[in-house]
Every structure is written in C-alpha cells, then in structure tokens.
Image: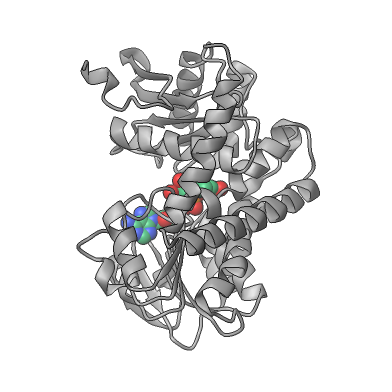
Amino acid sequence: MEDGFRFADELGPAKIIHIHEPRSALKAVLVVDNVAAGPSIGGVRMAPDVSTAECFRLARAMTLKNAAAGLPHGGGKAVVFADPAMPPERKERLVRAFARAIGDVKDYIPGPDMGTDERCMAWVRDETGRSVGLPPEIGGIPLDEIGATGFGLAVAVDVARAYCDLELAGARVAVQGFGSVGKHAARFLAEKGAVLVAASDSRGTLYDPEGLDVARLIEIKQAGGAVTDYPDGRKLDREAVVGIACDIWIPAARPDVLRKDNVDSLKARLVAQGANIPVTDEAEAALQARGILSIPDFIANAGGVICAAVEYHGGTQGQAFQTIEEKIRHNTERVLAEAKRRGSLPRAAAVALATARVRRAMDYRRA
Ligand code: NAD
C-alpha cells in the first residue's frame, strides 16, 4: 500500500493534507478523518514536534468523541508546526496563512487546541468564515475560560465514583498539566469536596498532601507563573506527578504520558483522561489489571467540543453547560456499565459505542 494510505481503515481518514508555504514559513498538516455525521470539528495544535501519525490519532479521537457525543460532526485535526510562544504579530500572520491554506476544505471546522486560542480562531474565521471556540464579541462561548472540558471531566468523575468505590468529599486529586483543562477540572472537583494535592506544568510538579488552594494556584498561572511558584508545598520534577499518591489522577497535558515504562508507578484509583490519547494501549491494560478505573479520553473530555458545537449552532453558555452535563453523564454511565457487564476495558466499550454510531452515519451517505 502507498505510504500515504498507511492509516487507512474502515472509518477513514478521508484526507490528509500537507501544507508547505516557504514565504510565510507555514508548515502544517490537516487530517480530516470522517465526515459521515457532518463537517469535521477538531483543534488546530501549534507545536514543533507532532508527527502526522499523532495528528491522525488525534483526528480519529475527534471522530469517536463527536460520534459518542451524538454531535452532527465528524472528526479532524490540524497541526501547525511552530513554537506557539512566538511574538503575537508573527503568530497572527502564520495562523492567517494556515486559515487561507485550508479555506477550501469546507468539511473541516477548526477549533482551538494546545498553542492556539480564541483570538487565533477569530483570525481563522476572518479568513475563512468558519471556526469554533470564538471570542464572545463575535458570538463565541469562551470554552477555555469557562472550563467546559474541566466541567465535563468533573461530571465523568462523579459518575465513575460508583464504579471504583470513591467518595468525592476528601478525594485526593493530582493533575498533570495545570492549563485550561487541568485547572478547571481541579476547580470543579474542589467544588464537589475533592482536594487537589498535586499539580504539574511543563516546568515542574507542586505537591502538598494537605491540599493546595486551587483559586490561588489558578491566579499564579494566569499571571504567567509556574505551579512551582506557589509559595508552599514541595517542588518536584515534572515527571514526579505520575507517582503521587492520590485517588483521582488527571492527565491534562500531552499524549502518551502513561506508558508501559511508568504506569506501574501510578498510585490512584481512578484516571480521568483530560488530555487526548494520554494513555497508551499497553498502559490502559496495565491499569485495568491493577484494578484502576480509567475513563477514556473521548468520553471524559468531550466538554470542549460539545461546547463548540453548541456555539456553532447558535446556542448559549447555559445551554452548553447543560448539554455537557447531560451527554457526559449519560455516556460515562453507559460506557462504564457496559465495560463492567462484559468485563472489558472501558475504552473497548467506548470505541464500540462510537464506532457503531459512525458506521450508522456512514450508511446514510451515498457510497
Ligand atoms: P493548555 O496549553 O492550556 O495546558 C496544557 C498544560 O500542560 C500547560 O500548563 C503546560 O505547561 C502543561 N504541560 C505541557 N507539557 C507538559 C508535560 N510534559 N508535563 C506536565 N505538564 C505539561 O492546554 P489545554 O487546552 O488544557 O489542553 C490540554 C490537553 O487536553 C491537550 O491534550 C488537549 O488536546 C486536550 N483537550 C483540551 C480540550 C480543551 O477544551 N482545551 C478539550 C479536550 C482535550
């Protein structure tokens, strides 16, 4: 088989587009995975080090996520290969160049992802007329600011309690990646009585078994600091967050952070996957073997895209929260119950649910 088709299976990908524009220094890849349910929605990641294979896996995760959430959208993902911390004027030029380059790919609706934000999405919409995750002034629901994904994670954890014999009051939470997803997950869980004992970012891990002040830590991050700038607690290296004794462990940073080589050091009862594809297949099996429940990414972290879809179809912030609660509660319950019934990994149950929906959507389309 041609190299370009190495990811091909029964669901997709529909297209993979590599973009290179030497004059604007734009290098990007777009994977439109499956559009049976409607135009694909997926984030635009800005990072120097993401492979096409990873972009495809992220696009597939979006196909499954959007299908599981019952949205009228397929899945896609784009990567702009660049350092997101570049000066703002250069970033605007690059994002606009990317938007123009994909302007005709009408079955892809870009959204924010790591390294891009609502301003970037406003530039994309200015160039192409379509994007989600917009600023409120142009009809957006600020999904990262309101913590749409973190809210959904807290809902998923609330459902999962019954499947791992966990009380939320006093439950110890460790968050890897105290960014848009991680900090709001910590905030919503703290509102339900849980205690944040560790948080990490790209610069290190902060740990205090007595509990951290979530609001204070959010302030420090919002002012541009690192979690390790928090005045109290122990400062550890970045990887230390994996081995912190806790009840709920939330990966909310990068892919493949729990792998065969480090999964045994995890000391938690529940993993709520905030990041996309944060646990390798081997590590997920190892968690199951140790009796650690793991809620799959595309079920637990669907809050952001559900919010984006509500925005795209003209809904309000209140409707977004209500839809997230309803859909994530229902899906988490359904997936965990089904996994328990057949003694399978929650991911296997989730993939079966989502794939069946995609297949049914494909059956409605002209062959
Ligand atoms: P973000 O950039 O706001 O936050 C990421 C955080 O992770 C930052 O604090 C960063 O310092 C930290 N980080 C980076 N590398 C790290 C490492 N190796 N170890 C520890 N921390 C590290 O990004 P985000 O929007 O919160 O997204 C985080 C993850 O969640 C991504 O995988 C993203 O695809 C996924 N996700 C995001 C949303 C959303 O609504 N934002 C929705 C679904 C999934």
Q: Is residue 215 above or below residue 172?
A: above
In this picture, residue 136 sits left or right of residue 81: right
**What residue sits 60% from the left and 30% below the top?**
73
List x then y, in percent, for residue 347: 43, 53
**What residue sits 57% from the left and 29% below the top?**
360
Q: State whether residue 243 appears in this view.
A: yes
User: Which residue is most to the bottom?
Assistant: 210
List x then y, in percent, for residue 212: 51, 80
In this picture, residue 139 sits left or right of residue 174: right
| Residue 132: quarter of image | top right
Q: How is the structure coloured here?
A: one colour
List x then y, in percent, for residue 29: 37, 24
User: Which residue is most to the front?
Assistant: 342
Residue in the foreground of this view, choosing between 352 and 347:
352
Q: State whether residue 150 appears in this view.
A: no
| Residue 290: quarter of image | bottom left
Residue in the foreground of this view, choosing between 106 and 363:
363
